[in-house]
Image (cartoon, grey):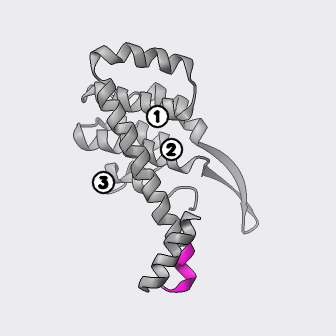
Amino acid sequence: MLVNNISSLIVQKGYIDEKRIKSESEKYLFMLCFILAYSFIAFTSESVCNQNLSETFKDIIDKNAKLSYSLLDIAIKLDYAKGSGIPFNDLEILMPKLVSREKTNIKGELTDRRVIHSNLPYRVLVQLVQDYCNLYPVSENDEQRLSSLFDVSVHDQNVNKFLYLKRGGK
């Protein structure tokens, strides 16, 4: 319903041709959801970094295995790290919930490709890691681990931009 409302606004303003209206409306709605999700996680993470709340949140994390709590936990660990290291163990546990490798038949050939299962949480995670990489120096070893974890080449011109590359042919 919201996509239809956004689409009708785009039609009224005449911004783009009618063939692209639905896809552009969906992109806009996704970005809106991404901004809200990222903002809530970042704000909560910053609040929980308060020593008085950290133990309470640790208890909540232990009782809830939901994806949102895992993202929040990683955000808190990145905030606490303050340049001392990326929580790779937590990232390696979370990534299989967000992406997988699948054999796909493309033009008659079986190809191994990465498939993102949960696009919004994946993009939030990417942004959290990107923020950390922009704030603190990242060692070459960590760059290689990140490129392996996010399935991109470490030889990109700017390794920090690798997190924004499209994955899985999307």
Q: How much space separates mark 3 and mark 2, taking CA atoms? A: 24 Å
Question: Can you say which quadrant of the picture contains the N terminus?
Answer: bottom right
Q: Nearer the viewer, residue 77 or 148?
A: 77
Instruction: Answer with left or right where residue 100 lies relative to residue 56.
Output: right
Nearest to N terminus: mark 3 or mark 2: 2
The residue that appears at 30% across and 14% down in the rendered structure is: 52
Residue tagged 2: 121
Kind of residue indicated by mark 3: Asn
Residue tagged 3: 158
Nearest to N terminus: mark 2 or mark 1: 1
Few, some or many C-alpha atoms within 10 Å of disc 2 (few <14, some 14-19, many ≥20)?
many
Q: How much space separates mark 1 and mark 3, taking CA atoms? A: 25 Å
Q: Nearer the viewer, residue 78 or 108?
A: 78
Most frequent secondary structure within the magenta stretch: helix
Label 3, secondary structure: give it. Answer: loop
Q: Quadrant of residue 76?
A: top left
Q: Residue furthest right?
A: 108
Q: Which residues are magenta?
A: 17-22
Q: Are marks 2 and 1 in contact (CB under 8 Å)?
A: yes
- Image coordinates of residue 22 in percent, x first then y, are 56, 73
Kind of residue indicated by mark 1: Leu
Observer-side mark, 3 or 2, equals: 2
Residue tagged 1: 71
For residue 72, say whether it is visible. yes
- Image coordinates of residue 115 in percent, x first then y, are 61, 51
Residue 144 in the image: above or below residue 90: below
The residue that appears at 43% across and 45% down in the rendered structure is: 37
- Image coordinates of residue 81 in percent, x first then y, are 29, 26
Instruction: Answer with left or right where residue 121 lies relative to residue 99.
Output: left
Instruction: Answer with left or right where residue 112 lies relative to residue 95.
Output: right
